[in-house]
Image: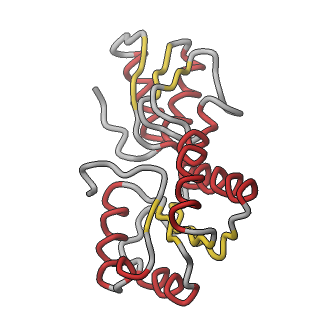
């Protein structure tokens, strides 16, 4: 077991160490889409199997797919297309999205844009936010001004928790439903 330190470059270094020094014949991980893409490429060059357990971006098994990479988690296409119709039916067709600025967030955004086109949803605003962001207030102010029928928060982990806490502090949760492709028990 190695820690990728939430960094694609470190993930590749650790993958190489596991295979070349520890003689691992397969790799299993990660939870960050960018790292999954990087480790998939490294595993391919090393000739070992990589089982992607949490990098949801479509590119892992799409345009950047390798013969030796397998996915056990949902792809972002699956997540957005499975939830998009329900979100539109329940909460209306004026969406605002807060998007983490890395492979996972970009893939989720692309998936919801595809769903929006099919359902006649108007994405009235969207903001890419850095993975290091802790203060969502500038973005939540824009959400309040836009008055969407639904706020879609695509961030995960601590960022998701921070976004929801701050949305509650702004009173947004009382006036605008908040949804997204997944909600993990730990965050709730």
Q: How many marks?
A: 0
Q: Residue at x 47, y 64 (%)?
A: 153
Q: In the displayed structure, does residue 137 sit left or right of residue 78?
A: left
Q: Residue at x 34, y 85 (%)?
A: 171
Q: Which is nearer the eye, 129 or 86? A: 86
What is the image's colouring? secondary structure
Q: Residue 35 location in percent, x, y? A: 48, 40
Q: Which is nearer the eye, 11 or 17? A: 11
In the displayed structure, 107 sits above or below 91; it is: above
In the displayed structure, 138 sits above or below 134; it is: below
Q: Quadrant of the C terminus?
A: bottom left
Q: Residue at x 35, y 80 (%)?
A: 174
In the displayed structure, 160 sits above or below 174; it is: above
Q: Residue 182 location in percent, x, y? A: 42, 49
Q: Residue 98 location in percent, x, y? A: 52, 68
Which image quadrant is residue 23 in? top left
Q: Which is nearer the eye, 118 or 23? A: 118
Q: In the displayed structure, does residue 33 sit left or right of residue 65?
A: left
Which image quadrant is residue 122 in? bottom right
Q: Quadrant of the N terminus?
A: top left
Q: Residue 135 location in percent, x, y? A: 37, 78
């Amino acid at each position: 077991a190695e820690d990728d330190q939430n960094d694609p470059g470190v993930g590749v270094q650790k993958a190489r160490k596991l295979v070349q020094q520890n003689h691992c014949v397969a790799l299993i991980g990660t939870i960050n889409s960018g790292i999954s893409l990087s480790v998939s490429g490294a595993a391919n060059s090393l000739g070992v199997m990589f089982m992607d357990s949490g990098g949801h971006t479509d590119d892992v098994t799409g345009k950047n797919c390798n013969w030796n990479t397998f996915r056990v988690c949902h792809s972002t296409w699956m997540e957005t297309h499975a939830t998009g119709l329900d979100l539109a039916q329940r909460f209306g067709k004026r969406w605002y999205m807060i998007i983490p600025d890395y492979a996972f967030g970009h893939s989720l955004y692309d998936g919801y844009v595809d769903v929006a086109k099919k359902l006649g949803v108007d994405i009235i605003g969207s903001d890419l936010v850095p993975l290091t962001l802790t203060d969502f207030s500038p973005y939540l102010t824009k959400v309040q001004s836009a008055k969407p029928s639904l706020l879609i928060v695509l961030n995960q982990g601590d960022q998701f928790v921070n976004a929801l806490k701050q949305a509650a502090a702004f009173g947004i949760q009382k006036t605008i439903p908040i949804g997204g492709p997944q909600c993990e028990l730990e965050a709730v």
